[in-house]
């Protein structure tokens, strides 16, 4: 499978405003319905401005490790990155269910996402009922389109106002009944949300002053995600996966092209180049990667003739990981339209909690795009999950080793002398210089990593992907039903062959029934193993690959 090398062609267009206060949790309850609403879609920026930015010459090189690593003894005060003054992705719209509330954690904040059919908007709120702190994500949307807590039946609208308390006496003094419902303590905090590139984003600050934050600062617009709409020669598939290691390691891993030959050996088919000098079985080679100036908003990098990588702090990264990246210019294949075969990947990395992150990945390509239209998404998810799992365990252990020696000393404890690590060095420089060395979890976490679970639990796919993926969950249910049908056919065939008298059916028919029973049984056993390895657990032993 060809995956993981993208060639970008448009830089993002959005503006940052960092003059915003730190995270606060102020709950506002309004008696009147708000006139403001966050639209589900918005007008895209003028793409002509991308072209002007695209012509910018990137020439800063990373010939030496010392040129890009952080200088901790700088005297001048640098501008700091505010982790709570950014937009964070919640989920792909295709994976959200309008019929039920869904719980999700971002930046250590427990959120409930639900569709307000009265306002026709997605709402993002605190996942806690103000009554007894029961999770609202375990509730339901009632017949009036309100979010109902199933513990005691309290109901809330899209503005967080409490609209119904069953236990409040309705035949008592009117002022008392109204006072109970309109109390600020009966409200649920609502976070600003916005839809961009078919992704629901939220602003992790429920202060009322940020209600219209999208008017001054929008989520990053990613032109690549609209590429398949503008050009029919491109096909697109998406993936969402919970990752059992931290945000920092996730971005590092995706920015590291040189690990592909080794960590994913035997899974990813990398076509050999006629001019490559192979020093080992896997065929690793020097990579010429240069990184532009790292600033508060991220950086731009260049990797040879394929184009630019872009890191948009704190979550978005896309760059050349594709077919052409592993081929010499003379041997690059062409698509049916005459273009060079290209694979574009957009990685959106979400901080969840210490030791946990979430990956939202989009893959686009201009060759064999018909496969994305003919085959269901779960077929491609099997390969994507196998790639993720093949280095998941070692990255989980690597995170513990980095934590023991403190991430602030990354440039001292890690030896990165080649240009192949330029992207990783650039990210660590940004993280140490502007981001404080790690994600700011405010007061929710101490930063300690969770204990390492059993290997099978760590590599679990069912709860980290299958359950929340609409395509994989349908395939999982369908294949399990097929397994049961095969088992029933096996038993029924044997039963018929044994029960029917000899003079009723011929010997050949009886042998046919026995053969069908045996075939159905073998097929059911194979299908059972396939389901387990594809949707539950697939181990990967590097020593024997």
Image (cartoon, grey):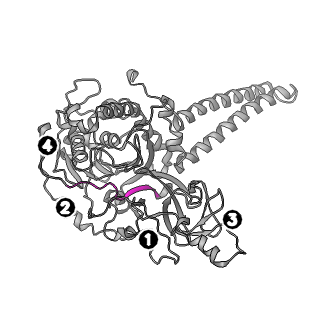
Q: Earlier in the sequence, mark 3 or mark 1?
A: 1
Compared across the picture, whether 84 is left or right of 460 comes to: left
Between marks 3 and 1 in the image, the one whose residue lies nearer the viewer: 3
Q: What secondary structure is marked by label 2?
A: helix
Dot label at residue 167: 3
Dot label at residue 53: 2
Which segment is the magenta one? 79-92
- In the depicted view, which residue is nearer to us: 245 or 385? 245
* Callouts 3 and 2 close, C-beta under 8 Å: no
Between marks 4 and 2 in the image, the one whose residue lies nearer the viewer: 4
- In the depicted view, which residue is nearer to us: 81 or 306? 81
**Position of 455 relative to 340 (above/below):** above
Q: Earlier in the sequence, mark 4 or mark 1?
A: 1
- Which residue, given by chain and number where applicable, does mark 1 sit on? 39
Question: Dot 2 surroundings within 10 Å: few (below 14), some, or many (20 or more)?
Answer: few
Answer yes or no: is residue 264 visible. Answer: no
Residue 66: % across, % down:
12, 38
């Amino acid at each position: 499978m060809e995956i993981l090398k993208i060639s970008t062609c448009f830089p993002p267009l959005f503006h940052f405003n960092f003059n915003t206060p730190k995270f606060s949790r102020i709950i506002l309850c309004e008696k009147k319905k708000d006139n403001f609403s966050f639209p589900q879609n918005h007008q895209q920026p003028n793409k002509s401005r991308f072209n002007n930015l695209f012509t910018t010459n990137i020439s800063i090189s990373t010939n030496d490790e010392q040129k890009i690593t952080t200088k901790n003894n700088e005297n001048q005060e640098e501008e700091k990155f505010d982790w709570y003054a950014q937009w964070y992705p919640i989920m792909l719209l295709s994976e959200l269910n309008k019929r039920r509330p869904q719980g999700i954690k971002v930046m250590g904040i427990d959120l409930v996402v639900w569709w307000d059919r009265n306002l026709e908007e997605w709402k993002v709120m605190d996942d806690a009922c103000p009554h007894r702190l029961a999770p609202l994500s375990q509730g339901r949307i009632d017949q009036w389109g309100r979010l109902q807590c199933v513990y005691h039946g309290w109901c809330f609208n899209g503005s967080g106002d409490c609209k119904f308390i069953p236990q409040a006496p309705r035949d008592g003094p009117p002022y008392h009944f109204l006072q109970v419902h309109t109390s600020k303590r009966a409200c649920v905090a609502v976070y600003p949300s916005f839809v961009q590139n078919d992704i629901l984003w939220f602003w992790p600050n429920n202060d009322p002053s940020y209600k219209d934050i999208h008017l001054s600062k929008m989520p990053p617009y990613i032109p690549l995600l609209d590429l398949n709409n503008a050009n029919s020669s491109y096909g697109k598939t998406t993936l969402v996966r919970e990752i059992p290691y931290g945000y920092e390691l996730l971005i590092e891993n995706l920015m590291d092209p040189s690990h592909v030959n080794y960590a994913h050996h035997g899974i990813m088919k990398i076509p050999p180049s006629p001019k490559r000098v192979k020093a080992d079985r896997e065929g690793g080679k020097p990579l010429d990667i240069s990184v532009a100036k790292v600033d508060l908003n991220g950086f731009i990098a260049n990797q040879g003739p394929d184009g630019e990588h872009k890191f948009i702090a704190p979550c978005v990264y896309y760059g050349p990981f594709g077919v052409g990246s592993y081929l010499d210019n003379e041997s690059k294949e062409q698509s049916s339209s005459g273009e060079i075969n290209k694979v574009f990947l957009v990685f959106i990395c979400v901080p969840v909690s210490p030791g946990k992150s979430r990956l939202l990945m989009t893959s686009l390509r201009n060759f064999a795009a018909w496969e994305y239209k003919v085959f269901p998404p779960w077929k491609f998810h099997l390969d994507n999950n196998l790639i993720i799992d093949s280095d998941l365990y070692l990255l989980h252990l690597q995170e513990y080793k980095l934590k023991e020696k403190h991430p602030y000393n990354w440039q001292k404890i890690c030896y990165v002398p080649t240009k192949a690590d330029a992207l990783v060095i650039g990210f660590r420089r940004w993280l140490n210089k502007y981001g404080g060395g790690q994600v700011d979890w405010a007061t929710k976490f101490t930063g300690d990593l969770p204990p390492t679970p059993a290997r099978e639990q760590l590599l679990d796919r069912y709860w980290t992907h299958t359950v929340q993926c609409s395509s994989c969950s349908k395939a999982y249910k369908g294949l399990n039903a097929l397994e049961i049908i095969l088992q029933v056919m096996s038993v029924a065939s044997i039963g018929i062959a044994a029960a029917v008298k000899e003079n009723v059916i011929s010997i050949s028919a009886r042998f046919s029934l026995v053969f069908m029973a045996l075939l159905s049984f073998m097929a059911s056993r194979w299908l059972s193993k396939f389901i387990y390895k594809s949707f539950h657990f697939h181990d990967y032993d590097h020593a024997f690959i």
